[in-house]
Each structure stands twice: as structure tokens, then as C-alpha cells.
Amino acid sequence: MFKVVLDTNIIVSALLKLGSKPELILRLFFDRYAKLCFSHEILEEYQGVLSRDKFRRHITKESLETFFTLLLAYGHLIIPTHKVNTILADPSDNVFLECAWEAQADFLVTGNTRHFPFKTFHKTKVASPDEFLQVIARML
């Protein structure tokens, strides 16, 4: 079973666009085909972004509560012990690398691969939704 860290843009797209590739990726975790790994910092980012006014008319409070309940039930909380100080377009993205490193995740899936200017970080492959789904399709 793959261990995966999801960038916030994948979560947002999954909740906004039913039937999208990000939603399919999210369903893989709830169907137990992969382990979703996250840290407290990642959870805070998910919550902060999903609570923005621009999403309130598209994502109800109830659906957010359900999402976070499922996330906590099916996901795996990671407590990173390594700090990452890479040069990224957005230094706040380091929390995803820290989580991936500690979890020894197989993948970090992001819709913004240009924000991560490398193909791998330690043992973790940085992948777009398409790349990740291609790997999963070969495994099933």
C-alpha cells in the first residue's frame, strides 16, 4: 500500500470538483488503496484554505466536518522530526516535505509540480495527479 501526502490544492480540487482526478485520488484513501499521511501543520493548512470565504458557497460546513472526520479516521497523523529548509517558491510548502520525509511516503501529489523543483525528495516521488493515477492504474 502506497503512503501519500497530498498538497492542499488536491484536497481543494477534490472537494470542489466531483468526478475529478483529485476526487478519485481522495477516494483511493477512503477505499484503503493507499495511506494518506498528514501532519498537524498540514491539517491546519487544509482547514485554513477550505474555510476561506471564496469556498463557503461551494463547500458546506457540514461537508467540511464530514471530510475532516473521515480524514482523521482513515488518514495517518505524522509527527515530523526533521525540519526542511529547501528553497521553494512558497516556503510554507516545506511542511509537506517534512511530513513526506518522516512518513517515508512514496508520493507527494500536487497540482503545482513547479512549486517543487525536483522529481524526488529523499524516497518520495513528487507527482502530478495524472502521474500518480497512472502508477495506481498499473497496480490495480
Image (spheres, helix red, strand yellow):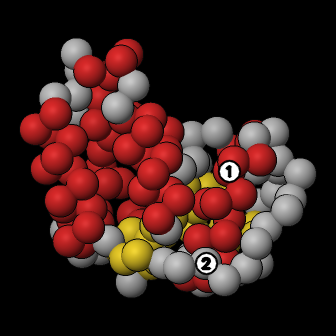
Q: Which mark is residue 80?
A: 2
Look at the numbered disc 2 and give the secondary structure of its residue: loop
x%, y% of residue 128? 58, 48
Identified by mark 1, the residue type is Asp
Looking at the image, can residue 139 be seen? no
Quarter of the image for the N terminus: give it: bottom left
User: Is 30 situated left or right of 88 in this image?
Assistant: left
Quarter of the image for the C terminus: give it: bottom left
Q: Earlier in the sequence, mark 1 or mark 2?
A: 2
Look at the numbered disc 1 and give the secondary structure of its residue: helix
Q: Which mark is residue 93?
A: 1
Residue at screen point 13% across, 50% down: 66
Looking at the image, can residue 72 be seen? yes
User: Is 67 situated left or right of 33 in this image?
Assistant: left
Q: Nearer the viewer, mark 1 or mark 2?
A: 2
Q: Mark 1: few, some, or many residues within 10 Å (few <14, many ≥20)? A: some
Q: Quadrant of residue 103?
A: bottom right
Q: Of all residues shown, which one is farthest toward the right?
A: 87
x%, y% of residue 51? 35, 32
Residue at screen point 21% across, 41% down: 64
Q: Quadrant of residue 102?
A: bottom right
Residue at screen point 76% across, 72% down: 83
Q: Which mark is residue 20?
A: none
Q: Mark 2: few, some, or many residues within 10 Å (few <14, many ≥20)? A: many
Residues under labels 1 and 2: Cα distance? 14 Å
